[in-house]
Image (spheres, helix red, strand yellow):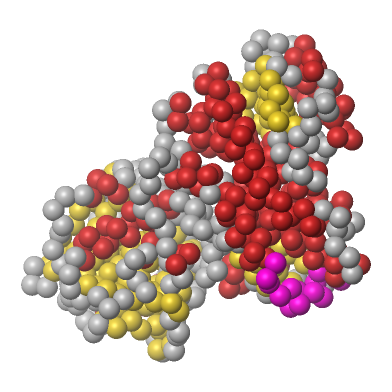
Amino acid sequence: MCGIVGCVAKENCYERIYAALSRLEYRGYDSAGIAMLQEGAGFHLRKKRGYVSNLKGRPLAGEAGIGHTRWATHGKPTDANAHPHGCGKFMLVHNGIIENYLSLKEELCAQGEQFASETDSEVIVKLISRAYTGDFFSAVRTACRRLRGSYAIAVLCSDHPGEVIGARQGSPLVAGASDTALYICSDIPALCGDADYICPASDGEFICIRDGKIQFFDEAGSELCKCFTRVLPESRAETSVSGTFMEKEIAQIPRAIADTLQGVSSLDYAPCARALRAAKCVYAVACGTAFHAALVFGDVVQNTVGAHVVCTVSSEFRYANLPIGVGDLVVAVSQSGETADTLEAVRLAAKRGAFVIAVTNIAHSTLAALADFSIVMRAGPEIAVAATKSYNCQLVCLYYLAAQMQYFRTQAYPVWFLSLRDLPAAAEAAFDCFPQMSALAAKWKDARGMLFLGRSLDLRTAAEGALKTKEIAYVFAEGYAAGELKHGTLALIEEGFPVVALSTRRDIASKTENALAESKARGAQVVLLSQSEESLNESCADFRIRLPNLPECLMPAVAVIPLQYFACRLCLLRGYDPDKPRNLAKSVTVE
Ligand code: F6R
């Protein structure tokens, strides 16, 4: 969470930082700030609560600068808590959480320091300032040695115009270069259009921009030899679109699925063949939407391959005391590849000797670097905070992985394997449901709560539909097992209560029908999504929505699309911005 950028450029330095911050805004938008260092004139600072656009105005002068867009952790979203934070000759921006900041703050207060913000970050700039004896890099290194927790920082020093120093421990940081500017930044797409070459830093490394070049150093201060790679066009994110990013990203789903299919089918799975064939136990870890994809993977592997998959949300993985070890397989799913909880789960799994497969959208992510084998989906940049196309693409990767697992075990692909190629067209066909979903959103615009019901794989889709509805439309929603309703939750149903039901498995359709009949009998308004018109009794739903027809195990990849769209419409009709839901950020790099 939080996005940071540092830039050295003779021309338009402020504008470049502003442009990068606008692209980093998905990481947090509680406040934003830019500090410029102008030779002979010192610092110029602009920081404000709210969106990056609040920093518009006459560009601040300077040849070096740092910028920040904040997702608040320590201290409310106020102007005072906005970064950059300053102390003496230094200005700093920080992404991450300093876990020992309270004891450091006490120590610094005892030495007479006064704090202008409630943030954990301000201790870092104070430590740097106190460690400074003329050597900028050495002061940053000395301060970093005192920090516990996670950080990516960018620092300016007024004695060293034209220099920016960055450090990374647990939060992402990359260096970027073009003919006219040198950067450090939280991610690659934010440097779109302005950095042709990039190089990610690893934990414990420092990036120094000085004398017109970028150098990497390790914790001991020794220079590292690193390779820069050319930025691929796919990494370049767009900044402005007509309509919202979320609408645009939903519209991109068929293309993203097709691109991802092409990517996964041209991958060589030999390096993970042994793990897929012989894993003693398979674990799937992820958070939020990615966890719903992991659950689908678990169901599909169980049904297709017959292997049991333990699916655990990443934040619980470390505390579940799982008997994980050598010979086990861990599949970690993460769009960003930077989710702190998932990274910690993977570190633990790797330490215990398990083989780790990453499914991520970002080839240069920390997750990809930690994993033994990576499957990189080709969803393209996803800017809206709520995951949409990345979910569909995660499913494509995971279906492919399940099929490979079956192949390595039996020398035969599952019966649904060839139908994967029908997914892009089926996703497009799911758009036919949009007018009905739009009408439904208008009808339920003022609802205070909703239930999404399903069984088996439909339960995963229901959970994802409910999560989207909660996170962007701020309507309480629950994805619930249809059969569980009668064990308590049915008490919530009253006249007009909205219920969205999914029924894509013909063999258990009549069971779902029971739950819908029970809901309707209590006054619920029931909308039913199914690929077959006949599968359910007419009387158990008020509206029916026809889904495209695919093998049942592939249905989650398309059945979710009308629900993603519904949540987006509901959000817009209720007057909210689907791209920037309150309290959230796209990349959750804190535990
Ligand atoms: C919901 C959403 C989140 C993410 C979760 C994991 O729409 O986007 O629930 O899915 O924070 O993020 P990644 O996939 O980047 O690990």
Above/below status of 314 relative to 267:
above
Q: Nearer the viewer, residue 140 or 224?
A: 224
**Is 555 positioned to the left or the right of 217 in the image?**
right
Residue in view at x 25 percent, y 70 percent: 156
Q: Nearer the viewer, residue 146 or 27?
A: 27
Residue 235 visible to an observer of this rendering:
yes
**Is 270 positioned to the left or the right of 256 in the image?**
right
Above/below status of 42 relative to 307:
below
Q: Position of residue 216 (x, y in %)?
A: 39, 82
**Is 505 positioned to the left or the right of 468 in the image?**
right
Residue 75 visible to an observer of this rendering:
no
Identify the image quadrant of the N terminus: bottom left
Q: Nearer the viewer, residue 128 or 187?
A: 187
Task: Determine the residue located farthest toward the left in the rendered image.
Answer: 40
Identify the image quadrant of the C terminus: bottom right
- As for residue 273 lying within the magenta part, the answer is yes
Q: Position of residue 330 (x, y in %)?
A: 73, 64
Q: Which residues are magenta?
A: 265-279
Residue in view at x 51 percent, y 35 percent: 568
Labels in figure, total: 0
Q: Position of residue 72 (x, y in %)?
A: 40, 48
Q: Nearer the viewer, residue 327 or 409?
A: 409
Q: Main secondary structure of the magenta part?
A: helix
Above/below status of 166 relative to 434:
below
- As for residue 83 lying within the magenta part, the answer is no
Task: Name the image quarter holding residue 301.
Answer: bottom right
Residue in view at x 68 percent, y 20 percent: 543
Residue in view at x 48 percent, y 64 percent: 234
Q: Position of residue 28 (x, y in %)?
A: 41, 49
Task: Name the image quarter holding residue 220.
Answer: bottom left
